[in-house]
Image (cartoon, rainbow, N blue to C red):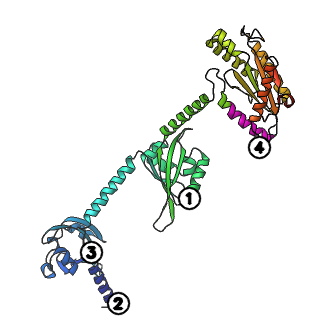
Amino acid sequence: MDIKLFDRILALGNLIGQARLGYMETNLDFQVTSWNTGAAQIFGYSEDDIIGCRLDMCIPINKEEITCARQAVVISDGGITKKTKSFTCEIFYSPIVNQQNKTCGHAILAKDISEQMPYQNKLQQQIVHLEDIYRYAPIGIFHVNPEGSITEANSEFAWMLGYESTDMIVNQITDFATQVFFDPHRAEEFMTSLFETEKVAKFRCRLKRKGTLSYMWALCFAKISYTKSGSINGFNGYAVDIRDTVKAEQNFKKANEKLTALSVMDGLTQIPNRRKFDECLGNEWNRHIREKKALSLILCDLDFFKNFNDTYGHQAGDDCLKKVAAAIDKSVCRSSDVVTRYGGEEFSAILPGTGRQGAELIAERIRTAIQNLHIAHKTSTVSKFVSLSLGIGTCIPEQGSSSDMIITMSDKALYRSKANGRNQHCVYDPARDGPASE
Protein backbone atom coordinates (compact mmCIF):
# COMPACT_ATOMS: atom_id res chain seq x y z
CA MET A 1 0.00 0.00 0.00
CA ASP A 2 1.17 3.52 -0.74
CA ILE A 3 2.81 5.00 2.40
CA LYS A 4 1.09 8.35 1.99
CA LEU A 5 -2.29 6.66 1.65
CA PHE A 6 -1.52 4.55 4.72
CA ASP A 7 -0.62 7.69 6.68
CA ARG A 8 -3.86 9.34 5.63
CA ILE A 9 -5.87 6.31 6.73
CA LEU A 10 -4.14 6.40 10.14
CA ALA A 11 -4.82 10.14 10.46
CA LEU A 12 -8.47 9.59 9.59
CA GLY A 13 -8.72 6.81 12.15
CA ASN A 14 -7.18 9.00 14.85
CA LEU A 15 -9.57 11.83 13.95
CA ILE A 16 -12.62 9.56 14.18
CA GLY A 17 -11.39 8.22 17.51
CA GLN A 18 -10.86 11.70 18.99
CA ALA A 19 -14.29 12.78 17.82
CA ARG A 20 -15.79 9.83 19.71
CA LEU A 21 -17.39 8.50 16.57
CA GLY A 22 -18.21 4.88 16.08
CA TYR A 23 -16.92 3.52 12.75
CA MET A 24 -18.21 0.23 11.31
CA GLU A 25 -18.07 -1.64 8.07
CA THR A 26 -20.36 -4.44 6.87
CA ASN A 27 -20.51 -6.74 3.91
CA LEU A 28 -23.49 -6.85 1.60
CA ASP A 29 -25.35 -9.10 4.06
CA PHE A 30 -24.87 -6.44 6.77
CA GLN A 31 -22.53 -8.63 8.77
CA VAL A 32 -20.06 -6.48 10.69
CA THR A 33 -16.53 -6.75 9.31
CA SER A 34 -14.95 -3.77 11.12
CA TRP A 35 -15.74 -2.25 14.54
CA ASN A 36 -13.61 0.49 16.12
CA THR A 37 -13.17 1.48 19.75
CA GLY A 38 -15.60 4.36 19.40
CA ALA A 39 -18.34 1.96 18.29
CA ALA A 40 -17.59 -0.27 21.28
CA GLN A 41 -17.95 2.71 23.63
CA ILE A 42 -21.19 3.91 22.05
CA PHE A 43 -22.99 0.57 21.71
CA GLY A 44 -21.43 -1.40 24.55
CA TYR A 45 -20.37 -4.32 22.34
CA SER A 46 -16.73 -5.25 21.99
CA GLU A 47 -15.18 -6.09 18.63
CA ASP A 48 -15.26 -9.80 19.59
CA ASP A 49 -18.99 -9.48 20.47
CA ILE A 50 -20.05 -7.99 17.16
CA ILE A 51 -17.72 -9.12 14.34
CA GLY A 52 -19.63 -11.48 12.08
CA CYS A 53 -23.02 -10.50 13.57
CA ARG A 54 -25.65 -8.59 11.73
CA LEU A 55 -25.55 -4.86 12.34
CA ASP A 56 -29.29 -4.61 12.91
CA MET A 57 -28.91 -6.34 16.30
CA CYS A 58 -28.07 -2.85 17.65
CA ILE A 59 -28.98 -0.42 14.87
CA PRO A 60 -32.48 -0.46 13.30
CA ILE A 61 -31.16 0.06 9.77
CA ASN A 62 -33.24 0.11 6.64
CA LYS A 63 -31.64 -2.44 4.29
CA GLU A 64 -33.37 -1.14 1.16
CA GLU A 65 -32.45 2.46 1.85
CA ILE A 66 -28.79 1.61 2.49
CA THR A 67 -28.61 -0.72 -0.49
CA CYS A 68 -29.89 1.98 -2.82
CA ALA A 69 -27.67 4.69 -1.34
CA ARG A 70 -25.18 6.20 -3.74
CA GLN A 71 -23.86 8.84 -1.31
CA ALA A 72 -23.63 9.53 2.42
CA VAL A 73 -27.00 9.61 4.21
CA VAL A 74 -27.72 10.79 7.77
CA ILE A 75 -30.52 9.66 10.09
CA SER A 76 -31.37 10.20 13.75
CA ASP A 77 -33.01 7.42 15.69
CA GLY A 78 -34.15 7.16 19.28
CA GLY A 79 -34.58 3.40 19.20
CA ILE A 80 -30.94 2.38 19.02
CA THR A 81 -30.14 -0.35 21.54
CA LYS A 82 -27.24 -0.48 23.92
CA LYS A 83 -26.62 -3.46 26.19
CA THR A 84 -28.31 -1.61 29.07
CA LYS A 85 -30.55 1.04 27.53
CA SER A 86 -31.87 2.75 24.41
CA PHE A 87 -30.47 6.08 23.32
CA THR A 88 -30.49 8.59 20.48
CA CYS A 89 -27.83 8.28 17.87
CA GLU A 90 -26.96 10.12 14.67
CA ILE A 91 -26.06 7.68 11.89
CA PHE A 92 -24.11 8.42 8.69
CA TYR A 93 -23.75 5.64 6.12
CA SER A 94 -22.40 5.28 2.64
CA PRO A 95 -21.73 2.39 0.24
CA ILE A 96 -18.18 0.97 -0.11
CA VAL A 97 -17.30 0.72 -3.80
CA ASN A 98 -14.44 -1.46 -5.13
CA GLN A 99 -12.13 -0.75 -8.02
CA GLN A 100 -14.67 -2.23 -10.44
CA ASN A 101 -17.15 0.41 -9.20
CA LYS A 102 -19.33 -2.23 -7.57
CA THR A 103 -20.78 -1.99 -4.06
CA CYS A 104 -19.07 -4.49 -1.83
CA GLY A 105 -20.25 -3.31 1.56
CA HIS A 106 -21.27 -0.36 3.71
CA ALA A 107 -19.42 2.15 5.86
CA ILE A 108 -21.24 3.55 8.88
CA LEU A 109 -20.40 6.38 11.28
CA ALA A 110 -22.35 6.77 14.53
CA LYS A 111 -22.47 9.59 17.08
CA ASP A 112 -24.29 9.45 20.41
CA ILE A 113 -26.33 12.69 20.70
CA SER A 114 -28.44 11.73 23.73
CA GLU A 115 -26.90 14.47 25.87
CA GLN A 116 -27.60 17.04 23.17
CA MET A 117 -31.28 16.19 22.76
CA PRO A 118 -32.61 18.21 25.74
CA TYR A 119 -30.83 21.29 24.41
CA GLN A 120 -32.05 20.63 20.88
CA ASN A 121 -35.59 20.19 22.13
CA LYS A 122 -35.35 23.40 24.13
CA LEU A 123 -33.90 25.21 21.14
CA GLN A 124 -36.70 23.89 18.95
CA GLN A 125 -39.28 25.11 21.47
CA GLN A 126 -37.67 28.54 21.52
CA ILE A 127 -37.75 28.63 17.73
CA VAL A 128 -41.46 27.78 17.78
CA HIS A 129 -42.12 30.49 20.38
CA LEU A 130 -40.19 33.06 18.36
CA GLU A 131 -42.08 32.10 15.23
CA ASP A 132 -45.37 32.53 17.11
CA ILE A 133 -44.27 35.94 18.39
CA TYR A 134 -43.18 36.98 14.91
CA ARG A 135 -46.41 35.75 13.35
CA TYR A 136 -48.93 37.01 15.93
CA ALA A 137 -47.20 40.01 17.55
CA PRO A 138 -49.40 43.16 17.58
CA ILE A 139 -46.47 45.16 16.16
CA GLY A 140 -45.06 45.26 12.65
CA ILE A 141 -41.75 43.40 12.23
CA PHE A 142 -39.65 43.59 9.09
CA HIS A 143 -36.20 43.23 7.53
CA VAL A 144 -34.85 45.40 4.74
CA ASN A 145 -31.85 44.37 2.62
CA PRO A 146 -29.04 46.78 1.57
CA GLU A 147 -30.86 47.54 -1.69
CA GLY A 148 -33.92 48.80 0.20
CA SER A 149 -36.25 45.87 -0.48
CA ILE A 150 -38.32 44.33 2.29
CA THR A 151 -37.27 40.68 2.45
CA GLU A 152 -39.26 39.66 5.51
CA ALA A 153 -42.35 41.05 7.22
CA ASN A 154 -45.04 39.77 9.52
CA SER A 155 -48.77 40.07 8.86
CA GLU A 156 -49.17 43.03 11.24
CA PHE A 157 -46.72 45.15 9.24
CA ALA A 158 -48.43 44.15 6.00
CA TRP A 159 -51.76 45.26 7.48
CA MET A 160 -50.28 48.56 8.71
CA LEU A 161 -49.18 49.39 5.16
CA GLY A 162 -52.45 48.19 3.60
CA TYR A 163 -51.16 45.00 1.96
CA GLU A 164 -53.25 41.84 1.95
CA SER A 165 -50.40 39.45 2.75
CA THR A 166 -46.74 39.29 3.71
CA ASP A 167 -45.92 37.92 0.27
CA MET A 168 -47.36 41.04 -1.34
CA ILE A 169 -45.32 43.39 0.82
CA VAL A 170 -42.13 41.40 0.15
CA ASN A 171 -42.76 41.28 -3.59
CA GLN A 172 -43.86 44.89 -4.05
CA ILE A 173 -41.79 47.06 -1.71
CA THR A 174 -38.41 47.44 -3.35
CA ASP A 175 -37.59 50.95 -2.11
CA PHE A 176 -38.29 51.21 1.61
CA ALA A 177 -37.65 54.95 1.89
CA THR A 178 -40.01 56.10 -0.86
CA GLN A 179 -42.69 53.41 -0.55
CA VAL A 180 -43.06 53.28 3.23
CA PHE A 181 -42.59 56.87 4.43
CA PHE A 182 -45.48 59.29 3.87
CA ASP A 183 -43.18 62.29 4.43
CA PRO A 184 -40.03 62.21 2.24
CA HIS A 185 -37.98 64.39 4.64
CA ARG A 186 -38.61 61.90 7.46
CA ALA A 187 -37.27 59.12 5.25
CA GLU A 188 -34.05 61.05 4.70
CA GLU A 189 -33.72 61.79 8.43
CA PHE A 190 -34.28 58.13 9.28
CA MET A 191 -31.78 56.73 6.78
CA THR A 192 -29.14 59.22 7.91
CA SER A 193 -29.75 58.44 11.58
CA LEU A 194 -29.72 54.68 10.99
CA PHE A 195 -26.49 54.43 9.03
CA GLU A 196 -24.52 57.02 10.98
CA THR A 197 -24.89 55.34 14.37
CA GLU A 198 -24.50 51.87 15.77
CA LYS A 199 -27.39 52.41 18.15
CA VAL A 200 -31.07 51.63 17.65
CA ALA A 201 -32.69 54.35 15.54
CA LYS A 202 -36.00 55.51 16.97
CA PHE A 203 -38.29 57.54 14.79
CA ARG A 204 -41.90 58.68 14.82
CA CYS A 205 -43.41 58.93 11.39
CA ARG A 206 -46.41 58.52 9.14
CA LEU A 207 -46.46 55.26 7.20
CA LYS A 208 -47.81 55.38 3.66
CA ARG A 209 -50.84 53.17 3.02
CA LYS A 210 -50.84 51.25 -0.28
CA GLY A 211 -52.98 52.62 -3.09
CA THR A 212 -54.34 55.60 -1.09
CA LEU A 213 -53.34 59.06 0.01
CA SER A 214 -53.87 58.05 3.62
CA TYR A 215 -51.32 57.27 6.29
CA MET A 216 -51.05 55.92 9.80
CA TRP A 217 -48.90 57.16 12.65
CA ALA A 218 -46.27 54.73 13.92
CA LEU A 219 -43.38 54.65 16.35
CA CYS A 220 -40.60 52.70 14.66
CA PHE A 221 -37.28 51.25 15.74
CA ALA A 222 -34.51 49.91 13.49
CA LYS A 223 -30.95 48.67 13.75
CA ILE A 224 -28.37 47.70 11.17
CA SER A 225 -27.82 43.95 10.85
CA TYR A 226 -24.60 42.21 9.82
CA THR A 227 -23.53 38.95 8.24
CA LYS A 228 -21.16 36.55 10.03
CA SER A 229 -18.30 38.10 8.10
CA GLY A 230 -19.19 41.56 9.44
CA SER A 231 -20.63 43.17 6.33
CA ILE A 232 -23.95 45.05 6.45
CA ASN A 233 -26.89 43.00 5.22
CA GLY A 234 -29.58 45.64 5.76
CA PHE A 235 -31.52 46.45 8.90
CA ASN A 236 -34.16 44.95 11.16
CA GLY A 237 -37.05 47.00 12.45
CA TYR A 238 -40.45 47.04 14.04
CA ALA A 239 -43.33 49.50 14.05
CA VAL A 240 -45.95 50.25 16.71
CA ASP A 241 -49.35 51.67 15.82
CA ILE A 242 -49.67 54.98 17.75
CA ARG A 243 -52.76 56.44 16.07
CA ASP A 244 -54.66 56.56 19.36
CA THR A 245 -51.71 58.25 21.06
CA VAL A 246 -51.41 60.90 18.34
CA LYS A 247 -55.16 61.51 18.42
CA ALA A 248 -55.04 61.97 22.20
CA GLU A 249 -52.09 64.36 21.82
CA GLN A 250 -53.94 66.38 19.20
CA ASN A 251 -57.05 66.57 21.40
CA PHE A 252 -54.88 67.63 24.33
CA LYS A 253 -53.21 70.29 22.19
CA LYS A 254 -56.58 71.69 21.11
CA ALA A 255 -57.81 71.69 24.69
CA ASN A 256 -54.62 73.40 25.83
CA GLU A 257 -54.90 76.02 23.10
CA LYS A 258 -58.51 76.64 24.10
CA LEU A 259 -57.49 76.92 27.75
CA THR A 260 -54.68 79.30 26.84
CA ALA A 261 -57.09 81.42 24.81
CA LEU A 262 -59.52 81.52 27.72
CA SER A 263 -56.74 82.52 30.09
CA VAL A 264 -56.07 85.72 28.13
CA MET A 265 -59.73 86.63 27.50
CA ASP A 266 -61.88 88.72 29.77
CA GLY A 267 -64.88 86.64 30.76
CA LEU A 268 -67.34 89.53 30.86
CA THR A 269 -66.49 91.59 27.77
CA GLN A 270 -64.99 88.77 25.64
CA ILE A 271 -62.00 90.88 24.62
CA PRO A 272 -58.38 90.21 25.72
CA ASN A 273 -57.59 90.83 29.39
CA ARG A 274 -54.74 92.53 31.28
CA ARG A 275 -52.57 89.43 30.97
CA LYS A 276 -52.83 89.62 27.19
CA PHE A 277 -52.14 93.37 27.35
CA ASP A 278 -48.85 92.81 29.22
CA GLU A 279 -47.79 90.03 26.82
CA CYS A 280 -48.68 91.94 23.66
CA LEU A 281 -47.21 95.27 24.75
CA GLY A 282 -43.95 93.58 25.78
CA ASN A 283 -43.62 91.83 22.41
CA GLU A 284 -44.46 94.99 20.43
CA TRP A 285 -42.07 97.09 22.48
CA ASN A 286 -39.16 94.74 21.70
CA ARG A 287 -40.13 94.54 18.03
CA HIS A 288 -40.30 98.33 17.70
CA ILE A 289 -36.87 98.65 19.33
CA ARG A 290 -35.48 96.50 16.52
CA GLU A 291 -37.46 98.20 13.75
CA LYS A 292 -37.14 101.75 15.20
CA LYS A 293 -40.79 102.55 14.50
CA ALA A 294 -43.35 104.56 16.43
CA LEU A 295 -45.66 102.75 18.86
CA SER A 296 -48.80 104.26 20.38
CA LEU A 297 -50.94 103.29 23.37
CA ILE A 298 -54.40 104.60 24.26
CA LEU A 299 -55.75 104.21 27.78
CA CYS A 300 -59.51 104.80 28.20
CA ASP A 301 -61.59 105.26 31.35
CA LEU A 302 -65.39 105.46 31.57
CA ASP A 303 -66.44 108.75 33.11
CA PHE A 304 -68.15 108.51 36.50
CA PHE A 305 -68.75 104.79 36.15
CA LYS A 306 -69.08 104.30 39.93
CA ASN A 307 -72.03 106.68 39.83
CA PHE A 308 -73.47 104.67 36.93
CA ASN A 309 -73.33 101.44 38.95
CA ASP A 310 -74.81 103.12 42.01
CA THR A 311 -77.66 104.54 39.92
CA TYR A 312 -78.52 101.68 37.58
CA GLY A 313 -77.13 98.62 39.41
CA HIS A 314 -74.25 96.26 38.70
CA GLN A 315 -76.17 94.24 36.09
CA ALA A 316 -76.70 97.36 34.03
CA GLY A 317 -73.03 98.20 34.67
CA ASP A 318 -71.94 94.84 33.24
CA ASP A 319 -74.16 95.33 30.17
CA CYS A 320 -72.64 98.76 29.69
CA LEU A 321 -69.08 97.39 29.84
CA LYS A 322 -69.92 94.76 27.22
CA LYS A 323 -71.30 97.37 24.80
CA VAL A 324 -68.39 99.73 25.35
CA ALA A 325 -65.83 96.93 24.81
CA ALA A 326 -67.50 95.92 21.53
CA ALA A 327 -67.61 99.51 20.31
CA ILE A 328 -63.94 100.13 21.10
CA ASP A 329 -62.92 96.87 19.43
CA LYS A 330 -64.93 97.78 16.32
CA SER A 331 -63.35 101.24 16.18
CA VAL A 332 -59.83 99.79 15.96
CA CYS A 333 -59.74 98.34 12.46
CA ARG A 334 -56.27 96.84 11.82
CA SER A 335 -55.63 93.21 12.72
CA SER A 336 -52.31 94.19 14.31
CA ASP A 337 -54.06 96.57 16.77
CA VAL A 338 -55.05 95.00 20.08
CA VAL A 339 -57.90 96.17 22.32
CA THR A 340 -57.96 94.89 25.92
CA ARG A 341 -59.84 95.38 29.16
CA TYR A 342 -57.13 97.06 31.19
CA GLY A 343 -58.96 97.21 34.52
CA GLY A 344 -62.46 97.48 35.96
CA GLU A 345 -63.83 100.26 33.73
CA GLU A 346 -60.55 100.92 31.91
CA PHE A 347 -59.70 99.80 28.39
CA SER A 348 -56.61 100.03 26.22
CA ALA A 349 -55.66 99.99 22.56
CA ILE A 350 -52.14 99.01 21.47
CA LEU A 351 -51.37 100.54 18.06
CA PRO A 352 -48.18 99.14 16.43
CA GLY A 353 -46.44 101.33 13.85
CA THR A 354 -48.72 104.28 14.65
CA GLY A 355 -47.59 107.86 15.28
CA ARG A 356 -49.30 110.62 17.25
CA GLN A 357 -51.58 111.81 14.45
CA GLY A 358 -52.90 108.32 13.68
CA ALA A 359 -53.40 107.58 17.37
CA GLU A 360 -55.44 110.77 17.83
CA LEU A 361 -57.72 109.84 14.93
CA ILE A 362 -58.38 106.42 16.46
CA ALA A 363 -58.89 107.90 19.94
CA GLU A 364 -61.49 110.33 18.63
CA ARG A 365 -63.19 107.54 16.69
CA ILE A 366 -63.42 105.51 19.91
CA ARG A 367 -64.79 108.48 21.94
CA THR A 368 -67.42 109.20 19.31
CA ALA A 369 -68.46 105.55 19.04
CA ILE A 370 -69.12 105.41 22.80
CA GLN A 371 -71.17 108.62 22.70
CA ASN A 372 -73.21 107.19 19.82
CA LEU A 373 -74.20 104.17 21.93
CA HIS A 374 -76.56 106.57 23.71
CA ILE A 375 -76.35 104.68 27.00
CA ALA A 376 -78.15 106.94 29.44
CA HIS A 377 -76.06 108.26 32.36
CA LYS A 378 -78.08 110.81 34.32
CA THR A 379 -75.54 111.10 37.12
CA SER A 380 -72.70 112.13 34.78
CA THR A 381 -71.69 115.80 34.91
CA VAL A 382 -70.19 115.86 31.42
CA SER A 383 -72.81 114.12 29.26
CA LYS A 384 -76.27 112.67 29.50
CA PHE A 385 -74.81 109.53 27.90
CA VAL A 386 -71.93 107.27 28.93
CA SER A 387 -68.64 108.85 27.85
CA LEU A 388 -64.90 108.17 27.84
CA SER A 389 -61.73 110.01 28.75
CA LEU A 390 -58.66 108.93 26.81
CA GLY A 391 -54.90 109.36 27.15
CA ILE A 392 -52.43 108.78 24.33
CA GLY A 393 -48.75 107.90 24.62
CA THR A 394 -46.54 107.73 21.52
CA CYS A 395 -42.81 107.03 21.24
CA ILE A 396 -40.10 105.19 19.37
CA PRO A 397 -38.81 102.59 21.86
CA GLU A 398 -35.07 102.64 22.50
CA GLN A 399 -32.65 99.88 23.47
CA GLY A 400 -32.57 99.36 27.23
CA SER A 401 -35.96 101.04 27.82
CA SER A 402 -39.07 99.40 29.29
CA SER A 403 -42.66 99.29 28.07
CA ASP A 404 -43.64 100.79 31.42
CA MET A 405 -42.57 104.12 29.91
CA ILE A 406 -45.39 104.26 27.37
CA ILE A 407 -47.89 103.14 30.00
CA THR A 408 -46.80 106.06 32.19
CA MET A 409 -47.09 108.45 29.23
CA SER A 410 -50.64 107.31 28.42
CA ASP A 411 -51.65 107.34 32.08
CA LYS A 412 -50.43 110.92 32.54
CA ALA A 413 -52.28 112.00 29.40
CA LEU A 414 -55.43 110.27 30.68
CA TYR A 415 -55.12 112.10 34.01
CA ARG A 416 -54.97 115.41 32.13
CA SER A 417 -58.08 114.47 30.10
CA LYS A 418 -59.99 113.99 33.32
CA ALA A 419 -58.57 117.19 34.84
CA ASN A 420 -59.60 119.15 31.73
CA GLY A 421 -63.27 118.11 32.03
CA ARG A 422 -63.42 114.48 30.75
CA ASN A 423 -65.10 113.14 27.57
CA GLN A 424 -62.02 114.03 25.52
CA HIS A 425 -58.58 112.76 24.58
CA CYS A 426 -55.18 114.16 25.42
CA VAL A 427 -51.74 113.32 24.09
CA TYR A 428 -48.82 112.99 26.46
CA ASP A 429 -46.75 116.18 26.62
CA PRO A 430 -43.65 116.06 28.84
CA ALA A 431 -43.78 119.85 29.27
CA ARG A 432 -47.24 119.66 30.87
CA ASP A 433 -47.40 116.07 32.12
CA GLY A 434 -43.88 115.67 33.46
CA PRO A 435 -41.28 113.07 32.52
CA ALA A 436 -42.52 109.56 31.67
CA SER A 437 -39.88 108.03 33.95
CA GLU A 438 -41.60 109.24 37.11
User: On screen, 369 above or below 90?
Assistant: above
For the point 43% across and 45% down, the residue is: 156
Mark closest to the chain's N terminus, 1 or 3: 3
Q: Nearer the viewer, residue 207 or 99?
A: 207
Q: Amino acid at mark 4?
A: Gly
Q: Does the residue at mark 4 contact the one at mark 1 (Cβ under 8 Å)?
A: no
Where residue 191 sits, quadrant-wise, is: bottom right
Circle 2 residue: 4
Q: Nearer the viewer, mark 2 or mark 1?
A: 1
The alpha-carbon separation of the residues under discs 1 and 3 comes to 53 Å
Query: Where's residue 88, x and y in %?
Result: 21, 66
Q: Does the residue at mark 2 contact the one at mark 1 (Cβ under 8 Å)?
A: no
Where residue 148 sits, quadrant-wise, is: bottom right
Mark closest to the chain's N terminus, 3 or 2: 2
Q: Amino acid at mark 1?
A: Phe
Circle 3 residue: 95
How many C-alpha atoms fall within 10 Å of the one at disc 1: few (<14), some, or many (≥20)? some
Q: Nearer the viewer, residue 104 or 320?
A: 320
Whether residue 315 sits left or right of residue 222 in the image: it is right
Circle 1 residue: 195
Q: Nearer the viewer, mark 3 or mark 2?
A: 2
For the point 29% across and 59% down, the residue is: 122
Circle 4 residue: 400
Whether residue 174 sits left or right of residue 375 in the image: it is left
Q: Does the residue at mark 2 contact the one at mark 4 (Cβ under 8 Å)?
A: no
Q: Nearer the viewer, residue 160 or 368?
A: 368
How many numbered markers are drawn? Answer: 4
**Part of the protein shown in magenta:** 277-291
The alpha-carbon separation of the residues under discs 3 and 2 comes to 24 Å
Query: Where's residue 115, x and y in %?
Result: 24, 68
